[in-house]
Amino acid sequence: MKKVLALALVLLLMTGGVALAQKKDFPRRDLTNVVVWGAGGGTDVCNRVISAEMAPILGVNINVINKPGGVSGSLGMSYAFSQPHDGYTLAGVSESCVTAAVQGGWDKRMNVWDFFIVGGSPDVISVTPGSPWKDLKGLVDAANKSPGTIKACASGAGSIHHLNLLALEKGSGADLQFIPYKGSAPCQTAAMTGEVSVVVTSVAEQQQLIRAKQLRPLAMLIPESFTIEGFGTIPSGFKAYPGLAKHLPIYQAIGFAVAADVPADRKAVIEAAFKKAMQSEKIKKWAKDNYYVLSGKTGKAARDEFNRLESLFSWTLWDLKAASVDPAKLGIPKP
């Protein structure tokens, strides 16, 4: 009887050892997350936070490095894609990367990746404190009375903020004069110096200026209202203009990607770690503190999101004559 029990124990230990070895088949060494934008930016910070949460779940380190440059993150994407497609290399990306191909910096569509979307900060339309408009309806009414005279900035042409501004115009009927800037910061500075009267950027970018009463928010460009600590609640523009629902919301999509042909079992391990990390209190607190809306999309839902963004951004740039490559030649469908 003792020999039978001992044999059973040996078999149990062996079976457990095999199962453990199988569980540790991937990853067996550290992963590298290649962030395609510079250190300290939104994509970089987001990837460092999620990587730090995923590392102990995976049982290895995730080393975050920055490879900025090229067009719309093309340098970092090219580097990450050139590495073995074995699941050990992640590419820290954002929705802005979808224009790399039509701007001539990337010779592939975004469907060569599988995405893991952490989230992003929603856009808000604000005005300068001295402006006469107290709500979105007041601004739209004024824009309709004097079409093309009210100056508005929303970062650069073809940016997510510009697309949100265009969608606002289509959904509300407003006709604003778009003034492009090289980024959200100079756009917001232009509002404070009186160069423009209206600003469309993210809550994360505006929140300090809103609390300091240097900008006055009129409406969120998402279906829900949004609360800023130390200020109050910003209403959704959808209530005043239900037609916005035909064109909005257009969310930021910040997270990371792996090559689409990474073995499915390895992608499953990464996905499980990502989903568990997204449920952590640290991630939830970080999102709340930084005015991010968490997504957590993976698989088909994430691919569909990036396909939609690629189509919308690429064709908008082409129509604005700001793209060097015809999206039709890349096989990018019209939105």
Image (cartoon, helix red, strand yellow):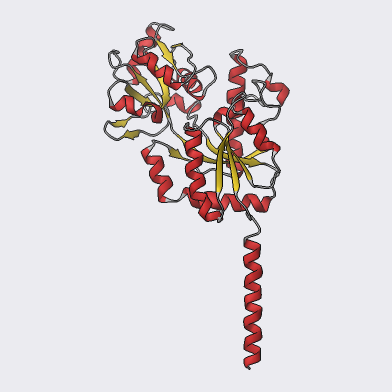
Give residue 76's quadrant in the image: top right
Q: Is residue 50 left or right of residue 4?
A: left
Please state the horizontal and vertical placement of residue 23, each as a whole percent of the image: 62, 61
Q: Residue furthest bottom?
A: 1
At 55% from the left and 56% from the top, the residue drawn is: 59
At 26% from the left and 33% from the top, the residue drawn is: 230
Instruction: Depth check: give the residue in front, 155 or 111.
Output: 155
Give residue 240's quadrant in the image: top left
Judge whether 121 appears above or below 60 on screen. above
Instruction: Depth check: give the residue in front, 191 or 14.
Output: 14
At 51% from the left and 22% from the top, the residue drawn is: 163
Locate the C terminus and report the quarter of the image it occupies. top right
At 52% from the left and 45% from the top, the residue drawn is: 51
Q: How many marks?
A: 0
Please state the horizontal and vertical placement of residue 140, each as a whole percent of the image: 38, 15
Q: Is residue 75 left or right of residue 95?
A: right
Please state the horizontal and vertical placement of residue 5, each as a whole percent of the image: 62, 88
Please state the horizontal and vertical placement of residue 238, each as a whole percent of the image: 40, 28
Q: Residue furthest right?
A: 329
Locate the N terminus and report the quarter of the image it occupies. bottom right
